[in-house]
Amino acid sequence: MDRGGCRLSGGGGGDNMITLEDLESVSEEQLSDSLEEEQEQEEEQQGRLLQYWRDVARGHQVEVPTDMAEPIQQITTNNDGAHTREQVPYTLITRKEKCGEVVYEKRHYEKAHWACITVHEDTYEQSICYGFMKIMRYICQQNSAGSYLGMTIPIVTVIRTDEMRTTLSRAVTVAYYLPTPHQSDPPRPYDPEIVVEQWPAAIVYTRAFTGATNELTIIHEISSLAEALDCPAVCVSDSFIVAGYTNPAAANRQNEIWFLERP
């Protein structure tokens, strides 16, 4: 087959010939340029997200390492839109309302696998930041499946208080619910500090709140939910859960405080 192909006549009477090889070459160059532009845009986005996290974390005296750039982007973009955030499933038992606003909900959660890490930093904010960064690495390929597992919400932190509920323990457990496809065979974490546990079914009393989560706000929310419950004595009295529906770097966090009903 003659690959001389396509002729263009110039205004000066001379002929300029463009071959198929030329067209293929132009196409490859354009494709290469496009891929390079996409890579540059992705790197710029990673850089912006990393800097945002660093700016927020600096206020809590937390350092965000450079190798967190890719996990932060994957979590933020749901792995470039390939995943949706799965909510931890539950059954609503009852809801108490007052003046049209929800005071608290009573829910039933089935037994499930959670990836957990216990952190002992100086403040609650530091613990959840360092703990969540490790969980993020587990979600983003540092697991035996070697793949992005998918983000679930809420990320929960188990906290403990003194008998008077005025002081938080330094031990904070950050936990991530394994997405449904991984519940039957949870991928093993590469980080030895992360353990996968099967939590038993539980009855949970929940109350929503917004804003920052720190020692003062958590103690306040624990007190508010205890006052709202008709019979707080049915719940565990020294261990509580903070459920976060937005990441620790979010400006306006959506949270819940959870009380566990005694078995």
Image: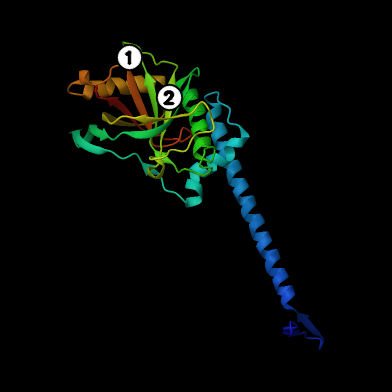
- Extreme residue in the bottom direction: 13
As helix, strand or loop, the secondary structure at mark 2 comes to strand
Q: Is residue 54 above or below residue 30?
A: above
Q: Is residue 31 above or below residue 175?
A: below
Q: Is residue 219 above or below residue 17?
A: above
Point out residue 42 in the picture as x, y percentages from the top left corner: 60, 49
Residue of label 1: 165
- Residue at 50% x, 33% y is 189
Point out residue 135 in the picture as x, y percentages from the top left corner: 49, 33
Residue of label 2: 173
Query: Is residue 60 toward the left or the right of residue 208 in the image?
Result: right
Q: Quadrant of the C terminus?
A: top left
Q: Is residue 248 above or below residue 16?
A: above
- Residue at 33% x, 19% y is 239
As helix, strand or loop, the secondary structure at mark 1 comes to loop
- Extreme residue in the top direction: 163
* Inter-mark Cα distance, 1 to 2: 18 Å
Q: Quick one: label 2, few (<14), some, or many (20+) residues within 10 Å?
A: many
Point out residue 103 in the picture as x, y percentages from the top left corner: 23, 31
Res 183 → quadrant: top left
Residue type at the position of mark 1: Arg
Residue type at the position of mark 2: Thr
Instruction: Tell which of 249 and 34 is nearer to you.
Output: 34
- Residue at 42% x, 48% y is 84
Q: Which disc is residue 247 wearing? A: none
Instruction: Tell which of 105 and 12 is nearer to you.
Output: 105
Query: Is residue 56 toward the left or the right of residue 14 in the image?
Result: left
Q: Quick one: label 1, few (<14), some, or many (20+) residues within 10 Å?
A: some
Q: Nearer the viewer, mark 1 or mark 2?
A: 2
Point out the tag, 1 or 2, that comes first from the N-terminus: 1
Query: Is residue 183 toward the left or the right of residue 68 in the image?
Result: left
